[in-house]
Image (cartoon, rainbow, N blue to C red):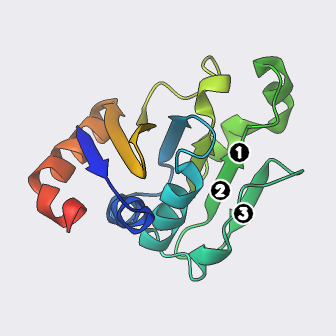
Amino acid sequence: MVIQTGRTVETIRIGKSIGRRLLPGDVVALVGELGAGKTQFIKGLAAGAGIRNPAYISSPSFTLINEYPGKMTFYHVDLFRLGEEKEAEELGLEDYFQSKGITAIEWADKIPSLLPKELLLIRIAYTGRNRRSLEIVGKGKRYEELVKELRISDCELRN
């Protein structure tokens, strides 16, 4: 599924719509170049998942992982500073993936062999000035069903 956006608020709104559908233990992997809108999407995702002050969500600078309490704990992982996948092995990511919270990972393409086989993959790309393309891919039955549900409610994502 691919959705085009023209403003940051649209990217946030799409994240929020998806966030409302997430369940405990869900993993969302984001891929995209610097400044493509991954953190803005995660703000929406967190808001939809019930995090009270998603505006305060920012990319973790030194800790790599931030936790936000809400209906479910929301884990925001930002791997931008990671040089190679081996550095992530010590982060204990498996514990986050198997938790009762929601885990959202920016720069997920830096840890391909550490990611769970089943997840929701979001590829964000520039398509023009202030334009973004969000490709949403479900890997595994749970996430394939989620993408089907998103297709059905496509107008909610766009409005």
User: Where does the N terminus fall, quadrant-wise?
Assistant: top left
The amino acid marked with disc number 3 is: Glu
Q: Is residue 62 above or below residue 95?
A: below
Give the farthest residue toward the front: 129
Q: x, y (%) of residue 140?
A: 34, 29
Which quarter of the rendered picture does the C terminus lie within?
Answer: bottom left
Question: Could you say which disc has been placed on residue 95 in the image?
Answer: none
Q: Position of residue 119 (x, y in %)?
A: 44, 36
Q: Mark 3 sits on what residue?
A: 67
Visible residue check, residue 18: yes
Number of residues whose C-alpha sits closer than 10 Å to that of mark 3, classed few (under 14), some (14–19) or many (20 or more): some
Q: Sequence order check: which comes first, mark 1 or mark 3?
A: 3
Mark 1–mark 3 distance (CA, rounded to whole Å)? 12 Å
Q: Residue at (86%, 31%) from the top-left corner?
A: 90
Q: Which mark is residue 75?
A: 2
Q: Outermost residue, bottom direction?
A: 52
Q: Nearer the viewer, mark 1 or mark 3?
A: 1
Mark 2 Cα within 10 Å, few/some/many (few <14, many 20+)? many
Left or right of 19, for residue 151? left
Q: Which class describes the residues within 10 Å of circle 1: few (<14), some (14-19), or many (20+)? A: many
Q: Tell me where residue 105 appears, x and y as whole percent.
A: 61, 43
The residue under label 2 is which amino acid type? Tyr
Question: Looking at the image, which residue is at 58% across and 27% down?
Answer: 115
Q: Are marks 1 and 3 in contact (CB under 8 Å)?
A: no
Answer with left or right where residue 8 lies relative to residue 34: left
Q: Nearer the viewer, mark 1 or mark 2?
A: 1
Q: Please tell me whether mark 2 sits on a helix, a strand or a loop.
A: strand
Distance from Cα at disc 2 to Cα at disc 3: 5 Å
The span from disc 1 to disc 2 (Cα, nearest Å) is 10 Å
Q: Which label's residue is closer to the chain start, 2 or 3?
A: 3
Residue 78 disc label: 1
Residue 147, x across and y down, in percent: 24, 43
